[in-house]
């Protein structure tokens, strides 16, 4: 990976995962641009060639606590196909609970199904 800024603590694990991913054989050249963010700033980029490489890297980075971003506009993705946010940033991210419906109370408080 190419560093654009100083790497945060724990970057060695990411660099090792990237180096191992590059060693995996590929059948197609996908040229996937991967970026790493810290405090909203892109600090490293790299390119992987195939599905096996991308999948291996993404699995290992997620295990290290980094948050994956796949969808977004060009500005959101900073020119990358995949972005990963540093764990300190991921902990501050909004709770995605908005996608769940709020619980519905089926029976008024103090009553049960048997009372009906």
Image (cartoon, grey):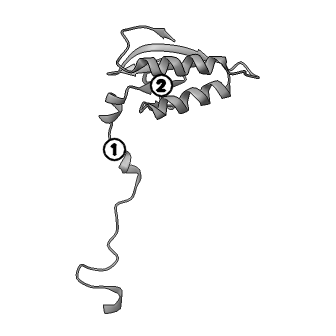
Q: Label 2's element?
A: strand
| Disc 1 to disc 2, C-alpha distance | 19 Å
Q: Label 1's element?
A: loop
Residue 74 x %, y %:
48, 21
How many dots with numbers? 2
In this image, 25 relative to 71: left or right? right
Residue 30 x %, y %:
68, 20
Q: Is residue 68 above or below residue 17?
A: below
Number of the label disc, if any, that sits on residue 39: none
Task: Residue lying at the far left in this picture: please name it.
Answer: 110
Q: Which of 35 and 79 lies nearest the eye of the viewer? A: 35
Which residue is disc 1 drawn over? 95
In this image, 78 relative to 54: left or right? left
Number of the label disc, if any, that sits on residue 83: 2
In the rendered image, which quarter contains the C terminus? Answer: bottom left
Q: Residues within 10 Å of mark 2 (few under 14, many from 20)?
A: many
């Amino acid at each position: 990976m190419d560093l654009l800024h100083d790497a945060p603590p724990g970057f060695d694990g990411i660099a090792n995962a990237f180096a191992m991913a590059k060693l995996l054989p590929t059948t197609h050249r996908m040229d996937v641009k991967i970026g790493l963010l810290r405090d909203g700033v892109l600090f490293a980029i790299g390119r992987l060639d195939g599905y096996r490489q991308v999948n291996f890297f993404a699995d290992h980075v997620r295990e290290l606590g980094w948050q994956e971003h796949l969808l977004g506009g060009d500005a959101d993705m900073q020119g990358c196909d995949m972005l990963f946010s540093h764990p300190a940033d991921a902990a501050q991210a909004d709770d995605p609970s908005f996608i769940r419906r709020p619980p519905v109370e089926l029976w008024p408080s103090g009553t049960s199904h048997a009372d009906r």
